[in-house]
Image (spheres, grey):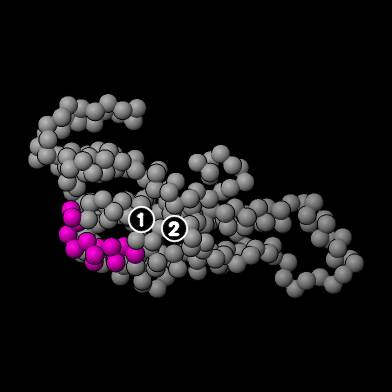
Amino acid sequence: MAGQTDPHVSLFSPEEVEFMAEDELVEIVPNMNMEPLNFIAGDFGRFIPQIPIQVPLWLAVALKRRGKCTFRPPGWLSVDNLTQVLEAEREPQSKFQALPFSYVEIARLLFDHARDDIPDMYMVRSLVEDIRDVRLHKLENNLGTFLGTSAVKMENVSAMEVNLVRPFARRALEAFYKHDKPEAAADRGTRSSRQPREANDEPRVKPFTLPTHLYFSF
């Protein structure tokens, strides 16, 4: 993975974030009899027709492709729940609403491979996309005020959102760290004796703009 093997690359690609999300457990309903499957990640099964069972998302997709199961969509992936989440996200000064850490990747994989198992699939997909866009806009606005602090705390952010803001947060924290170092203060004092002091001595961090090419479209 580029984000792990190259120390100069801090962003995972959308495909890499999706790959990591495939370990999330989902519920399927098998339509075949099969003994437990043994993998490095664990043992899954036994598979009995019409008896729901939890398996990793990657295994569920593989079985679905072979016509061996149907998906049971997670409870959060419903029109009613997503409508409530979207309304709450749009409230002024609202916090990020609780969603699965990999909600974007899980939803996208289900849309691609199990659309026939999702009631009101097109409405659900539209709601997920709207939630993602609202949250990204909120994230961009919040980080635009990321000044005068050496730490930041955000709750209920998703894997994709963490991946997008990580480079900016790292650069910003490095700037504040350098600004607060004693040698940096001494250097500023030396410069101030030779030139007028700037009105604003805060460390400068470039405005945060989301790299939109790094997240999936539905």
Query: Do callouts 2 and 1 mark residues in contact (Cβ within 8 Å)?
Result: yes
Q: Is residue 135 left or right of residue 79?
A: right
Residue 183 shows up from this direction? yes
Q: Residues within 10 Å of mark 2 (few under 14, many from 20)?
A: some
Whole-number angstrom distance, CA of label 2 to CA of label 1:
9 Å
Q: Residue at x 45, y 68 (%)?
A: 137
Is 131 part of what is drawn in magenta?
A: no
Query: Measured from the top left, where is residue 4 in percent x and y?
Result: 53, 40
Total residue callouts = 2
Farthest residue to the right: give it.
194
Farthest residue to the left: give it.
50
Q: Which residue is mark 2?
A: 215
Query: Measured from the top left, where is residue 25 in percent x and y?
Result: 28, 41
Quadrant in the rendering for residue 85: bottom left
Q: Which residue is mark 1?
A: 104
Is 125 part of what is drawn in magenta?
A: yes
Q: Residue at x 53, y 53 (%)?
A: 166
Query: Measured from the top left, where is residue 55 in percent x and y?
Result: 25, 38
Question: Predominant secondary structure in magenta?
Answer: helix
Q: Is residue 174 left or right of residue 101?
A: right
Q: Secondary structure at mark 1?
A: helix
Task: Give above or below for 51 relative to 94.
Answer: above
* Span shown in magenta: 116-129
